[in-house]
Amino acid sequence: MSVSVSALVWSFEKTQSEPAVAIQLLPGDLKWNSDPKLHGLQTVTLAGNPNAPEPYAERIKLPANTRLAPHSHPNEARMVTVLSGTLYFAYGEKFDEAKLKALPVGSFFTEPKDMPHYAMTKEEVILQLNAIGPAGTTYVETQSELKEK
């Protein structure tokens, strides 16, 4: 935990020496991006650059009936808040619906570095992710195993 906090403090100290940029976004200003690799998810970066070693904020929209296979992320300090809908979420290397916990609006969770987790939705869900880049996703199963299913 102290490594994550130290990295977060270092990153914010680093950005404070750079000129501040004020950002104000209304919901209608958001330009959602779709990527076929993201299995129907849409994202919008609110601030920062997920591909750089710096803090960033992102919104993630998951359609109804989405099932996210077990995966992990290489970056530290991933913090997520449920803004709309209910996300069903669990940690582990194997998808087990019985272990999913319902996270309604206002719920908060973390995705520790390299810790596998999975999720599903029954309705559209919007999340806010605050993290330090660079971002990435590694699935527990290999791509060839995913194609066979």
Image: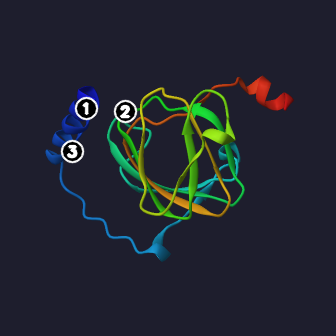
Image position, residue 97 (x, y; %): 68, 41
Give left or right: position of 143 versus 93: right
Q: Which mark is residue 71?
A: none
Q: In this view, does 12 lie above or below 95?
A: below
Q: Which amino acid does label 2 sit on?
A: Glu
| Alpha carbon separation for disc pair 2 and 3 | 17 Å
Please tell me which of labels 2 and 3 falls first in the chain: 3
Q: Which mark is residue 76?
A: 2
Image position, residue 131 (x, y; %): 37, 43
Label 3 element class = helix
Give left or right: position of 114 versus 69: left
| Alpha carbon separation for disc pair 1 and 3 | 12 Å
Q: Residue furthest right?
A: 148
Name the residue located 21 percent from the left edge and 31 percent from the top edge.
Answer: 6
Single out the mark in the foreground, 1 or 3: 1
Query: Where does the N terminus fall, quadrant-wise?
Result: top left
Q: How crowded is mark 3: few (under 14 residues within 10 Å), some or many (20 or more)?
A: some
Q: Which amino acid does label 3 sit on?
A: Thr
Quadrant assignment, res 113? top left
Q: In this view, does 91 lie above or below 48?
A: above
